[in-house]
Image (tube, rainbow, N blue to C red):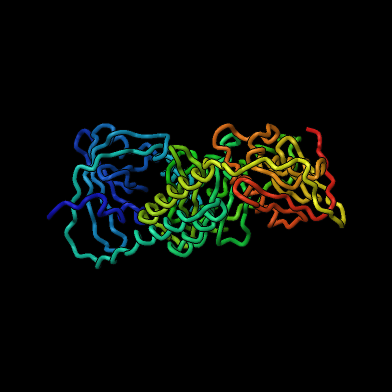
Amino acid sequence: MTSPSLHAIRPCLEGAIPAVMSTCASDGTPNVAYISQVVYVDEDHVALSFQFFNKTRENILANPRASVLVLDPVTARFYRLHLHYLRTETSGALFESMKARLAGIASHNGMADVFRLKGSDVYAVEHIDAIDGEGLPSVPGRTGLLHRLRLCSERMAACTGLDELLQGALACLRDALGMRHAMVLMLDTPAQRLYTVASCGYATSGVGSEIALGHGVIGVAARENTPVRISHMTHAALYSHAMRSSLQAGTADDATLAPGTEIPYPGLPAPHSQLAVPMVAAGRVLGVLFVESPQDLAFDFEDEDMLVALAGHLGAAIDLLQTAPEASETAPSPTAQAPTVSGATVRVRHYPANDSVFINDDYLIKGVAGAIFWKLLRDYTQAGRTEFSNRELRLDPSIRLPDVADNLEARLLLLQRRLQENNPPMRIEKTGRGRFRLCVACPVLLEELPG
């Protein structure tokens, strides 16, 4: 019988059923133990979770040979992997991805210490045996995946603006791939944060909500530039929402920051499957494409492969839109007068420490998007201007855009969405490529707080 390939038995490596690992001491004494994770690395390698120093670990360091028995959760067929230990990784993409998966398993009460990952042991797969015995019929593989991916690619390729692109990508996830809960987050590199720019499937959009780089499934995927997939969890929302405590801790001692500037995260209250994939262009992480489900085992490795391909296309499209020349863009006249307004005066407060903006005591936005909004309102109240261009924003030092990858279009979209959702008497309208208009329907009083 031909030895099966590692790729052919990938369903055995999804972690649904623990594997059995056998090792041998230097004196020939055998040892058998359960192992939490056997992870597919590539066609010739797997990684096993190193969680505590026990007899298995001792044996491997003395004799780097092992065999692992894995089970297909659908057909109930067993396979034996003959392994050769190569190295242990304690940092990097593989380690962080396995650590995130264990966090889902560790969400079971009282198991956090047991499922604390110390390292990822990488093994070469020398041979695979199919164990004799009856099994259940194989489930036919999903068909049409490549065609669905093609439809998504064609839809995104036709988009000419960032908003259209993001909404098109989310619609593809929902309609073509059946992923109903999703969001797109962009990376703010100087702030070491990711901020939500679009979402679908939630009661509130959560646009503007932030996640610290390296925190939770999303933050780890961005920091390590690797997909992170968790397929079975109970209270793993504690892990995926870990950014809450980190953000609060980072601002608790800073009296200059405005209170109440956290926008609620839009995620599911009790997710059972999550998949976060970085969006990369020219080797640079732009953000994260994230999906989740209330069902266990909702996403398998094929879903991960599709999302990686989709995220790659999305990242390239975002980068192209952000860097495309805007030859038709011209700086509008600063003498253009605003239309007459009426009604009660709206008070707008600005905290320079983090550029947070409040409208009549209600928090709106902060960061670069807040600085942009404050600049627009200043020019409006001082000179009556309503017409603006992306070019002048990039040249304005008060906005403090980063020198590289400023994501200006994403920040303008974020501001536009926040204004739409909070429904103040002001909004932003796009008037052409690289141009937009500030519409204000009532008198505005600006207050800049010290700091």
Determine whether 221 is above or below 77 in the image.
above
Q: Which of 90 and 35 is in front in this view?
A: 90
Image quarter where the N terminus lies is bottom left
The tally of labels here is: 0
Residue 212 appears in the figure:
no
* Residue depicted at x 50% and y 46%: 318
Is residue 351 visible to the viewer in this orientation of the structure? Answer: yes
Q: Residue 116 placed where, x, y %?
A: 45, 42
Residue lying at 78% horizontally and 56% vertically, measured from the top left: 425
Q: Position of residue 137 (x, y in %)?
A: 24, 68
Q: Is residue 151 left or right of residue 268?
A: left
**In the figure, residue 451 lies in which quadrant?**
top right
Q: Quadrant of residue 374?
A: top right
Q: Between residues 405 and 275, which one lies in front from this camera angle?
A: 405
Q: Of 183 and 434, which appears nearest the observer?
A: 434
Q: Eyeballing the image, is 123 above or below 80?
A: above
Q: Is residue 439 left or right of residue 322?
A: right
Please name whichever residue, 12 or 152, is drawn nearer the observer in this view of the structure: 152
* Image location (x, y in percent) of residue 392: 66, 38
Answer with the quarter of the image where residue 298 lies.
Answer: bottom left
Residue at 59% across / 50% down in the picture?
A: 197
User: Horizontal and vertical percent for residue 30?
Assistant: 23, 42
Q: Would residue 15 appear left or right of 440 to someone viewing this image?
A: left
In percent of the image, x 54 and y 58: which residue is there?
A: 270
